[in-house]
Image: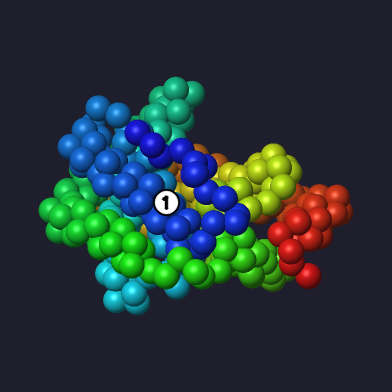
Amino acid sequence: MADEKWIAGLAGTMPASEGAKRALTLRLGVVRDRLPDAVFHADEDSEHIHQLRVGTRRAGAALRLFAACLPERLYKKTRKTLRTLRRSAGAARDWDVFLEMLQARLVKATAKQRRGLDFLLGFAHGQRVLAQDHLRQAYSAEAEKLGQRIQQVSQALDETDHADQSLSELAVPMLTQLLHELESAAHADLQKYEAVHQVRILGKQLRYAMEVFETCFAAEFRQRYYPAVVEMQDILGLANDSYAASQRLNALRTRLMRTQPKQWPHYQDGMEVLLRFHERRLPQQRRKFEQWWQAWLKSGAEAAFAKLIGGT
């Protein structure tokens, strides 16, 4: 299945509309091809869900990058279809991550902690089943539309005048803007999770744009700067996982204490040890990002990267 991060056949000198057709055909095709396994075989391998979510993210990023090459109405319809599938796959994947974390914690849990963790395991399995039902509903509503959108996008790009800007001419301002937005977000008050989340979103957008435009630049773009952006995203991804888990656990704890006060002590140790872990890890990951960012600036990497892509 051709869902590699890099897109074969792209070149900085080709017309942007031609690059758009190659990129969007691949990215949208991955979503189409990954969808059936994610819907019907997720119980056999949770990787199907993970790859579908990644595929929808990459497809959505490519769609944003080449929006100007498409009729506005088609762009919006395709974006809506991808958003529906991405959100459904994302909800399922979030519960898969939570379940994987619980399984790892159970291995080293004490007897008292296990009662709460077993409760969470059952609860999470129930939520995961609901998430899969929602994904099936999204599949029923959007799968046929997705196939139509792929055909319509291809046809629209065939009809686009190829005497337009080159792929490199499109890449430079887009990457420069993303880099500036990331820099601005990184200087916000990162004690607020919303600020950390915004950095994560922009880092993700930069990464997926780099995957599309890498052939437009020198080798160090892919060999040096892309791995650095991936490292940043990994740091912030763990922060996001812990934030989501903390929110989920706090809400469930409050509900149990209110509705099942006599049962709560049986679950308390297991739930709170997990909650404390995530409450510790979130600020740890925030500090790791701050260290990463300072190292990125101190090394001159940001300035060199901006110069490489033609930014000022």
- Foreground residue, 250 or 17? 17
Find the residue positioned furthest to the front.
163
Q: Quadrant of the C terminus?
A: bottom right
- Foreground residue, 14 or 92? 14
- Left or right of 268? Residue 200 is right
Q: Is residue 159 above or below residue 72?
A: above
Q: How is the image coloured?
A: rainbow
Residue 74 position by quadrant:
bottom left
Q: Is residue 216 above or below residue 312?
A: above
Residue at the image point whose x is 51% and y is 70% from the top: 164
* Local crowd size for mark 1, using a 10 Å CA cut-off: few (<14), some (14–19), many (≥20): some
- Left or right of 201? Residue 251 is left
Find the residue positioned furthest to the bottom.
72
Q: Is residue 201 visible?
A: no
| Residue hosting label 1 | 22
Residue 250 position by quadrant:
bottom left
- Left or right of 185? Residue 1 is left
Residue at the image point whose x is 54% and y is 56% from the top: 14
Provide residue 23's location: percent of width, then percent of height. Answer: 43, 52
Provide residue 70's location: percent of width, then percent of height. Answer: 37, 70
Residue at the image point whose x is 85% and y is 50% from the top: 299
Q: Is residue 129 visible?
A: yes
In what element is the residue under mark 1? Answer: helix
- Foreground residue, 182 or 272? 182
Residue at the image point whose x is 38% and y is 37% from the top: 2
Q: Amino acid at mark 1?
A: Arg
Q: Disc count in the image?
A: 1
